[in-house]
Amino acid sequence: MRTALKCLLLLMTFNLYAATVTEWYVKTDNDQVKLKVDFFMTSTCPHCHKADAFLKQLEKNVDWLIVNRYVINKDKSALALFNQKLREFHASDFRVPSILFCHSRWVGFDTAQTTGEQLLKGLSYCHQQIKKEGHLTSLTKEVLNRWSLSPFQLSKTAAEYSAFSIITSTAFFDAFNPCSVFAFILFLGFLFVYPARREKIIVGLLMIVAFGIAHYLQQAKIEAYYQLLIWIRWLVILLGAGLVIFSVLSLRKIQLTITGYFLAFLSAIAVFAYQQTCSRLNFSLFFQQWLDVEKVQPSLAAFYQLSYQLIYLVPLIALWLAGLYFFSGQRGRFYQPYLTFIGQLYLFAIGLILIAYPLFLSELMWSVLLIVLLTFIGWFAIRQKYRTR
């Protein structure tokens, strides 16, 4: 009897869970994939009517869309459903138009040529991936959630600002966004650990190039970027172990110069890859969407892309040059032992994180606290060492 009751309870729990999880697609008898789109709007919203017209036209052009429309200011059940859907996305705002598909939420709509094009890109991508993989993968969800960031703002931005303003401001915001904390710390860690000026120059250049490559990949090749996160997990563990060993040997005055260069280059890519998941506010992706909407000549697009990448790297280059200048002076040489030990702690901690839980790199608050703590411990320990001499 108890076994039967347990089975019944388990079945009820499963049914309740299944009822609350959205099914984002269906497969017909002839194995055709059709996407389900939930469109939430109000009758008084002009942008909602633009989005509705776009979706109606899209339904005529493709046969793999099922659009369910909900007018939340006229139907209480539609409003309740919208609230339920928002909970699935851990959201609390009721902004409309909201277009939900493939576990992604796209808010706002301006024109078919701007917002509509990005929306169609997302729908087509999801449809193709489900046909290819046989189901909606976590990789597809991640890519779509990044793409859905802010397509509504693209046309407004393009209309109000020049290309120069968009490129420079977005690149600088991108460089100083919260996701950059560990990148700067890793960079400083290697600069601090290497005592010779020539070594600081080489390791700095290698890491700047590595950050540039990783940044371009996650901006222009986002699908490959997130696929890379899946593939490189074991490599990241090896890199973490390498950083731990390198920092310990450095602490014992055993310098592996060439090995350290390879570690610096590869760990820069690994740290950048994992820390970029800290926020949905991805400025480089916004720039890429803007570039797609602008439809400029390939040569001009390449120039814009190169300009953006160089401007993004300017703060890192400035930090590198400032470090070289600082360590070339008497004060820099005086503080070198302090900073070397702090750098060793930085690399040791990042190595442990890469081994145990690399997604910790995307936890902004804890990462900042860890860096402050390591800096304090390093400074205090080295001062005590010199006082006891």
Image: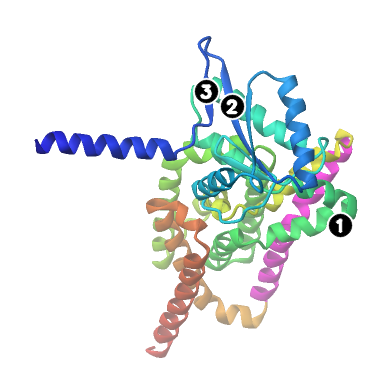
Whole-Å distance between the Cαs marked 1 and 3?
44 Å
The residue type indicated by label 2 comes to: Leu
Q: In this picture, which residue range is highlighted in magenta?
A: 299-328
Closer to the eye: label 1 or 3: 3
Whether residue 11 is situated above or below residue 63 in the rendered picture: below
Please give the residue where the numbered disc 2 appears in the rendered image.
35
Q: Position of residue 165 (x, y in %)?
A: 86, 57
Residue for point 80% across, 46% down: 46
- The mark nearer the N terminus, 1 or 2, is 2
Residue for point 75% across, 60% down: 172
The residue type indicated by label 1 comes to: Ser
Quick one: quadrant of the N terminus? top left
Q: Residues within 10 Å of mark 1 (few under 14, many from 20)?
A: few
Indicate whether residue 302 is drawn in magenta. Answer: yes
Please give the residue where the numbered disc 1 appears in the rendered image.
165
Residue for point 73% across, 31% down: 55
Please give the residue where the numbered disc 3 appears in the rendered image.
26
Q: Residues within 10 Å of mark 2 (few under 14, many from 20)?
A: many
Question: Foreground residue, 38 or 367?
Answer: 38
